[in-house]
Amino acid sequence: MNQIPNYKQYLSKNSKISQKVFLLLGEEESLKQDFINEISVRHFGKIPEYRHFHHDNPDDFSAFITYAGTSSMFSNAKTAVFSGLEKSIQSSLNNSNLNDLIENLCDDTMLFFRTSSNSVPAVLKKIPAETVIFWRAFENELSEQIRKSFSEKKIQISPADISLILEHTGRDSGKIAAALEKLESYSESQPVNSEMIKFILTNEKE
């Protein structure tokens, strides 16, 4: 059984992209959008037209099928993204529509399916897609990233206060990046301390 590559491995091994259908696994949602943008540009050679659909909206599956299955009058490159697909194709009709879409996919279209699961959901296993996984980094790796970020800007911070930041953000890289931006701006190159972190990140804690 082939191991599913993570996004860094996939990007490093595939400078040119011919595959048009991708399944993105894993909890690290904040990195998926950057990956979609990069893969789309590598495939089309330019930034494509883009739309994102979600299973929470009951009308989005049919809208996704229509959008992805129709050539655009205004662009020869478009990307359609669907989050939570496994929750929308439980019915045989939706499954059939999806299979038809992929089999007859237009040359100007790429599809990306996003799921927070770390393994391929059973209902998605038959989809002919390139699968990539987005693992969340371990806390020690994130601590080092935070330390390095502040160090590069010559801002002092203690290991205890780095841990306090992670208490507020969890291991979500998107939340961490936003928190660091706020703290770096607020500190004005002064040392970051616990009072500052609690004041700035009160609403960030999971």
Image (cartoon, helix red, strand yellow):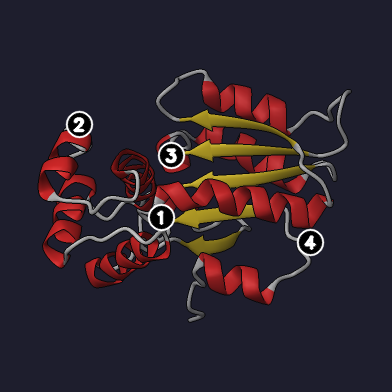
Q: x%, y% of residue 1? A: 48, 81
Earlier along the polypeptide chain: callout 4 or callout 3? Answer: 4
The residue under label 3 is 84
Earlier along the polypeptide chain: callout 1 or callout 2? Answer: 1
| 72 horizontally vs 185: left or right | right
Q: Are marks 1 and 3 in contact (CB under 8 Å)?
A: no
Judge by depth and name the residue closer to the eye, 71 or 128. Answer: 71
Q: Residues within 10 Å of mark 3 (few under 14, many from 20)?
A: some
Of the two numbered discs 1 and 2 in the rendering, the one whose residue sits closer to the viewer: 2
The residue under label 1 is 122
Mark 4 residue element: loop
Above or below for 169 versus 62: below
The residue under label 4 is 18
The amino acid type found where label 2 is placed reads: Asn
Q: x%, y% of residue 115? A: 42, 48
The amino acid type found where label 1 is placed reads: Ala
